[in-house]
Image (spheres, helix red, strand yellow):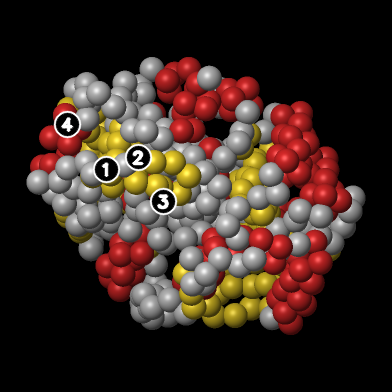
Amino acid sequence: MAAFGTPELMTSWGRVARQRAARARPAFLDEVASLIGQARDTTLLGIGLGRSYGDSGLNAGGNVLDMTALDQVIAFDPKTGIIRAEAGLTLNALLRIAVPRGWFLPTTPGTRFVTLGGAVANDVHGKNHHTAGTIGVSIRRIGLHRSDVGAIELSPDTNAEVFRATIGGLGLTGLIAWVELQLVPIGSAYLDAETIPFTGYDAFMALARASTPGFEHTVAWIDCTSSRDGRATRGLFSRANWLDDGDLAAHDDRTHATLPLELPAMAINPISLKAFNALYFVAGSRKQGRQRTHYAPFFYPLDAIQNWNRAYGSKGFYQYQCVVPYAAADLAIPAMLGEIARSGQGSCLAVLKTFGAKTSPGMLSFPREGVTLALDFPNRKTRTIELFDRLDSVVAEARGRLYPAKDGRMPATMFCKGFPLLDAFSQHVDPRFQSDFWRRMSQ
């Protein structure tokens, strides 16, 4: 029988937030209720593979229920594409099962090394938001264990308000035990992908508008060091549709490389950032045009490097992801890009893409119709926080919001203003489930 161990150090994916908590790792669903009962006097939080960048996956001084051993498929119908699985099943394992049978995730984040429960708790989005929305749109049922009422089943028609709170609810409504998901059919594991170099925010928006009607997947990498005013930022626009050639070969689980050690803290500096971005743009420009591309490098390029988060050194890094509505984006996005370029704190992996109008059932779902910008920043402490404060001002003026799953320092006032259903959500928080993020937002 699983039990909580002695407190151990746990670290966010960004490696800035580090806290101690006692961990239990149940191997059977039957153990969950007992473990929740054991922790009557302390707070609880369910966790997966620890890919949350900030502190939403940490519970300092409390207990965490590590769900990674609960990774079994409960039922899968290869005719309908409906799969029910324990919350600890990784997207990596799910794809190995589904792809050879002609099915794929309806929505996928930029890594397949997250659990199904974690994907639901953060209501992940992908490159196809304009066609599919978030993963919450495709969730049929959820099995939830709460400390006050025990095991309950959630769906759009059963415990509907708790269902809405749990999707994107950061694991605060109780422990997600299992998930039932509708997959989407594919005729190939390969995509017809096209890369288009561009210069300028207006050029990006023109490509995004032209591509949305005819392409399921769209995204852009940008060189955030290339324009001090933010309007002439260059980048590489990618758009793709699934092929239908019958080649349903799943990805190879072997990683291509690993980063065994932390890089020196100053390895990522203004000079190296500018050089990397320039080389990446040139290399990408040489590959412009259409290519037959397997889903693994298209959706999950960073999964080819194990422990890539060590590249930012011992101080770790922050990710800043925001979304602003279209009405304000033409001013707000260039303003933020200008601030970032002038600060010299840019990113090697800056992503710019658009969100569509499809609404998630999740009360705290991050995407909304508009433009989203995501960047990694080495932790330069005060300098970085001061930059984020300036970016926050732009986002707030544009009436945008930040992504809680990526956040490690968002002001509580910004969280409250960015999520209008926060009060409704709070009514469904399990009285025993807490996280560092939630305590920070509740102060």
SS class of the residue under badge 3? loop
The residue that mark 4 highlights is 38
The residue that mark 3 highlights is 50
Q: Which residue is drawn at 22% across and 30% down?
A: 39
The residue that mark 1 highlights is 6
Q: What residue type is labelled 4?
A: Gln
Residue 329 shows in the view: no
Foreground: disc 2 or disc 4? 2
SS class of the residue under badge 2? strand
Query: Where residue 434 sits: x, y (%)?
Result: 38, 29
State the separation of the CA atoms marked 4 and 1: 14 Å
Mark 2 nearby-residue class (10 Å; few <14, some 14–19, many ≥20): many
Q: What residue type is labelled 1?
A: Thr
Residue 293 shows in the view: yes
Q: Is residue 38 left or right of residue 287?
A: left
State the separation of the CA atoms marked 3 and 1: 19 Å
The residue that mark 2 highlights is 21
Give the number of marks: 4
SS class of the residue under badge 4? helix
Q: What residue type is labelled 2?
A: Ala
